[in-house]
Image: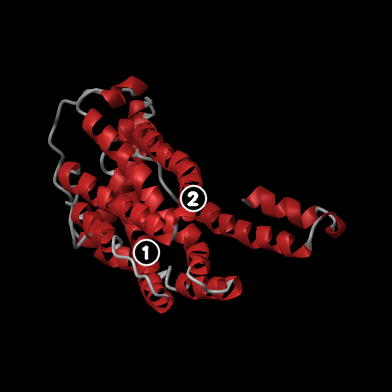
Amino acid sequence: PFVAAISYVLVPTHFLIDGWRWVMVIGGAGSMFAWHLRRGLPESPRWLECRGRTAEASAIVDAIEREVEREHGTSLPPPASVVVSVEARLPFLDLFRPPFLTRTLMMTGFQVLQTIGLYGWANWLPTLLVQQGVPLITSLRYTLLMALTSPLGPLLAAVTSDRFERKWTIVALSSAMVVRARAPWQVIACGALLTMVSYWFSAAFHAYQAELFPTRARATGVGFTYSWSRLSAAVSSLVIGALLVQGVGAVVLLISGAWLGVALIIGLLGPKTNA
């Protein structure tokens, strides 16, 4: 995003429509903030140790210990000696063998369905309102008002993430999003609430999925299973477009069914991760 934003600033105006130029600049500006945070983000000591970079790993752990000692005003007890097996890499096919197989399959199904529910609602809401007789401009205005509740979702996730078991938080939020309103005014009132809940859900599941695989398998496991959500986003858009021919009810049924599937998958197969 940063490179895109800079290039759009430097390209002469007559090559671009001004509106799109500044949309790209605004969208890319957030990368500067992310870059600043990235500079102070330490690497995982376990990952460094697996790569034989023990001195870097030890330095990070030492810094963490000093910080804890300052916070508590006391020295830490010496660590107990344990025997560990260091594995430098995880073969990709190990994701499909115990103990990872169940979690890999669970998160693959979860990612396919949560994308249908999350983006099916967010991306198609203006069209669904138009199908119910709301003018397009009015529909877009309503969608904008609903989007204003988006920041509340991650804030609620920050407050509740460690207070409630993340597994059951995901189940509860996805179950809540099964409900759908019909009348336009109900859609507007309910839509603002569902927009907030969907971003709460998104923050919760991103934390949860990272806790399902150990350090050596985390990037591979999360990356592979999350990639199914991108494929689902492409296919589900075509499916929803085709279902609109049958009416709004068919689309609502698909989205609600996807949310119900998410709740069942995590409720039945998802391990607890808090604490």
Could you tell me residue 229's position as x and y percent? Answer: 42, 42
Res. 209 image quadrant: top left
Which residue is painted at 41% across and 79% down in the image? 185
Q: Which residue is mark 1?
A: 154
Q: Which residue is mark 2?
A: 38
Asked if 38 appears above or below 195 in the picture, the reply is: above
Could you tell me residue 114's position as x and y percent? Answer: 35, 49
Coloration mode: secondary structure
Q: Closer to the camera, 174 or 59? A: 174
Numbered circles on residues, count:
2
Which residue is painted at 84% across and 59% down in the image? 13
Asked if 11 appears above or below 192 in the picture, the reply is: above
Q: Is residue 100 visible?
A: no
Which residue is painted at 56% across and 76% down in the image? 138
Res. 137 image quadrant: bottom right
Could you tell me residue 21's position as x and y percent? Answer: 73, 60
Residue 82 horizontal side relative to residue 10, left or right: left
Q: Secondary structure at mark 1?
A: helix
Which residue type carries mark 2? Arg
- Seen as rendered, the residue at the extreme front is 246
Query: Looking at the image, is mark 2 or mark 1 earlier in the sequence?
Result: 2
Whole-angstrom CA distance, mark 2 to mark 1, is 20 Å
Could you tell me residue 110's position as x and y percent? Answer: 31, 43
